[in-house]
Amino acid sequence: MRAGLDALVATSAANVEYLTGFALRMQSLELFAGGHPLVGILVSTGPPVLVAPITDMVPAVFRGVTAATRSYGRNYVALPEGAQDLGRDERAVIEALKPDTTFPDAVHAATVVLRDARVRRIGVDDGGAASLYCALAESLTGIECVPAGDTWRRVRAVKDSEEIERLRDAAGIIEVAMEEVWRHTRPGATEIELARRASRVITDAGARPTLWYVGAGAASALVDRLPTSRAIARGDLVMVDFGCEYCGYYADLARTAIVGDPGPRVAERYAAVHAAEAAAIARIRPGRVVADMFDHAVRAARSNGIPRFDRRHVGHGIGLEPYDLPILLAASDDSLEAGMVVNVETPYYEVGFGGLQLEDTLVVTEEGVEFLSGAPRTLRLL
C-alpha cells in the first residue's frame, strides 16, 4: 500500500469505478447519488469493497461487478412473498436486494468495513463531497484519515491493456464522427448542424457526447464557444474538437480543415502547429520529464512560423476522467511511464485570423509511443 497507508478510500465516481468496476453512468443518477454516495475501499489485506445504496446492488450484479459489496439504506423495490416461478434475472434481483446487515448510510457501512480490517491509517480521495470526507473522519475515531487525492490520480495514470483498448475504442468513435462532419462541411452548412451530426454519430455508437465544438472562419479562434447558426463560407477555417465517454473512458480529439485553398498564411501556421505536436510526440519515452515535451513543442512552433506561440500546457493524460495525470506543463517534474495515455495538443488561436487545432491520443510504450488515434494529421482540404 502506498504512502504508509493501510487502506485507500474512493469517493469520486472515477476512483470508485477504477477500484470496483461499478459506475452509475447516467449523469442524472450521479447527481441524485450526491446524498446516496458510492464508496470504494481497498485494504492491504483483502479484495476491493463497493459500498452502495441497496437499490444500486441490482445494476452492480448485472454488470458483473466482482468486488465485495456492502449495501446501505432502505429497499423500495417490492419483493414477492413465498415461492414464485421466477426467471434467472429476477432471482438475481431478489438476492441482490437481501442485505446481510442493514446500514443506515454510506458512512456507517464504510466504518464497519474499515474497523473490521483493523486499519490505523487510511487515505481518502478528494473527488467526493467534502461532507462525506468529514463524516468519515468523525466516524473513524482512532483511525488517522489523510487526503489521498494525488495518490489515486497517480495510481490511475498508468493504464492496463483493457483500459487502453477502451480508450482506443472511444477515440475511434470520435474519428468516425469527424469523418461524418467533413462529409457535410460545405458552404451553407452551419456550425450547429455539423455539431448535431457529430453528436448523433457518437450517441448511435453507444457513447455519451461530452464535447462538440465546431468553429468556422475567424470564430474558430473563440475557444469553448457553443456552435451557432453561422453558415460556413468558402475560404473558412473549420476547427472541430470532439469528445465522448464510452464504457467509462474518455476521448478528446481535434482537427482543422479549410473550405478551399489555404493560402500561404494558413499553410505556414498550420505547418507550425503540426511541427509543434510532432516535436512533443518525438520526446515521449518512459522516464522523460513532461516539461521536456512542453519545451520542444513551443520551440518548434515558434521556429516554424508562429513566433508568438504560447501555451499553458501541450496536453494531458486521459482515462476515466478527461484530464488525468500527467498534465504536460512547462514547470512539471512528472515523468512519463509505460502505460500512460496522453493527449498531445498544440493549438493556436488568433482573434481575427482563426484557430488551428491538432490533438491526438497516444500510449507511452517501452519503445516510445503508439497512436490510439489514426486520423490524418495534415490540414484537411475540403
Image: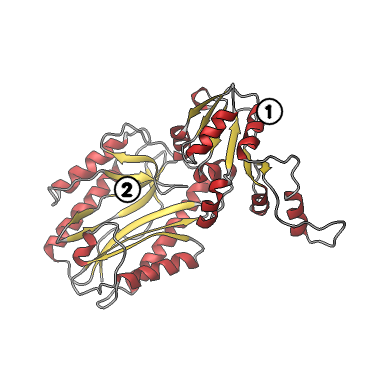
* Percent coordinates x, y for residue 321 in the rendering: 44, 47
* Percent coordinates x, y for residue 271 in the rendering: 19, 55
The structure residue drawn at horizontal position 26% and vertical position 50%, both measured from the top left corner, is: 346
Location of the N terminus (image quadrant) = top right
* Percent coordinates x, y for residue 345 in the rendering: 29, 50
Location of the C terminus (image quadrant) = bottom left
Q: Residues within 10 Å of mark 1 (few under 14, many from 20)?
A: few
Kind of residue at disc 2: Val
Q: Which mark is residue 344?
A: 2
Kind of residue at disc 1: Asp
Label 1: element kind:
helix
Q: Nearer the viewer, residue 339 or 14?
A: 14
The structure residue drawn at horizontal position 52% and vertical position 54%, both measured from the top left corner, is: 247
Residues tagged 2 and 1 counted as in contact (Cβ below 8 A)? no
Render colour scheme: secondary structure
Whether residue 152 is situated above or below residue 353 in the rendered picture: above
Mark 1, residue position:
116
